[in-house]
Image: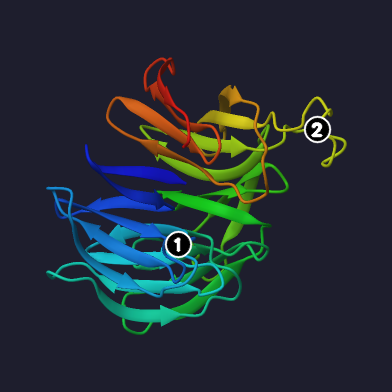
Amino acid sequence: MLEFELTPDRRLGPCMDVCAFGGCFYAVQNGAQFPGGRICKIAPDGSVADEYIDIGSARQIAVQDGIAAVSARENGLWLFDLCGESIRPLAHYQTVEYATGIALWNHFALVSCRQYGVEIVDIADARHPRFISLIRIGEVQSACVVRDVLYCGVWGAMNVAVVDLRDIRAPRLLTRLPLQGRGDGLTASGGYLYAAIGQHRRGIQNLSDPDDPCFGCGNGLEVFDIRDVSNIKHLRTIYTGRAYISSFDTWRVYAFEKCIVATNSWLGYFAFRKDTLELIEHACSK
């Protein structure tokens, strides 16, 4: 969860996810502050320019060609038009199960559906989304696409599932990349995959025992060389600290020009130099 700063004297509050489009930021929020869930538009001056409320348990947002896709857990998938002055809803699609993560590729929405893997939805006509296929690969929290390959952060099984999307109606699992913590957020940049991990480290024996040496020790970031998808190489695991407060936890990763930022609900955010992965900034959650 991100704490998004608007201006020095004003705060938007906790955000589940943010993205940029057309010179503005868009944020999705829920919880005590916005129990019905909302998507809002944040203008360059820091003001909230528009909002659309009652979308449910908003979790992630992705934008492509002016269309925003929002995953909203039990409330499925929302599609919005961002090209006008206001946020305009186009469609509400009921996914096969809890819609947790969202990635956009070509004219498809790839929805991470908790226990049911990834649901692929055709959104070429954003007013009439259509079911295409379902990839049963476990409890996927987040996903990203590089060319025609889908990378999925699988939570309980602690791995990245790598899927060939060339036959969109029958996607094929290529391999699984072991992670040292539970899988969630993913991003790719420059031929490298950055996978955020969290909660318990691989090898934990007792999930209810805080004295287990792996308890709460799986928080961090893992890096893979994906330039050759037939020979993916694990490069590094960076642990960012011990923390486990509850199962309600998210961890994401974002790639920028010169840095990689990993976020964790309880530990805050960690910024690393992109070339050396040296930690350059850390701020705790509030």
Residue 125 can be seen in this image: no
Nearest to the observer: residue 260 or residue 3: 3
Q: Are marks 1 and 2 in contact (CB under 8 Å)?
A: no
User: Is 239 drawn above or below residue 167 in the view shown?
Assistant: above
Residue depicted at 29% across the width and 25% down the height: 258
Q: Residues within 10 Å of mark 2 (few under 14, many from 20)?
A: few
Residue depicted at x 13% and y 48%: 44
In the picture shown, does residue 35 fall above or below 183? below
Q: Residue 184: horizontal and vertical position, in percent?
A: 57, 46
Q: What amino acid type is highlighted by mark number 2?
A: Pro
160 horizontally vs 151: left or right: right
Task: Answer with mark 1 or mark 2, whichever residue precedes in sequence.
Answer: 1
Q: How many marks?
A: 2
Question: What is the C-alpha distance between the residues marked 1 and 2?
Answer: 30 Å
Residue 210 - label:
2
Residue 235 in percent (x, y) is at: 55, 22
Disc 1 crowd, CA 10 A, few/some/many (<14, 14-19, 20+): many
Q: Residue 209 bears which disc, if any?
A: none
For disc 1, the marked residue is: 30
For residue 156, say whether it is visible. Answer: yes
Identify the residue at image location x=84%, y=41%.
Answer: 208
Q: Amino acid at mark 1?
A: Asn
Outermost residue toward the front in this view: 9
Place residue 2 in its image quadrant: top left
Residue 225 picture location, percent across and down: 49, 29
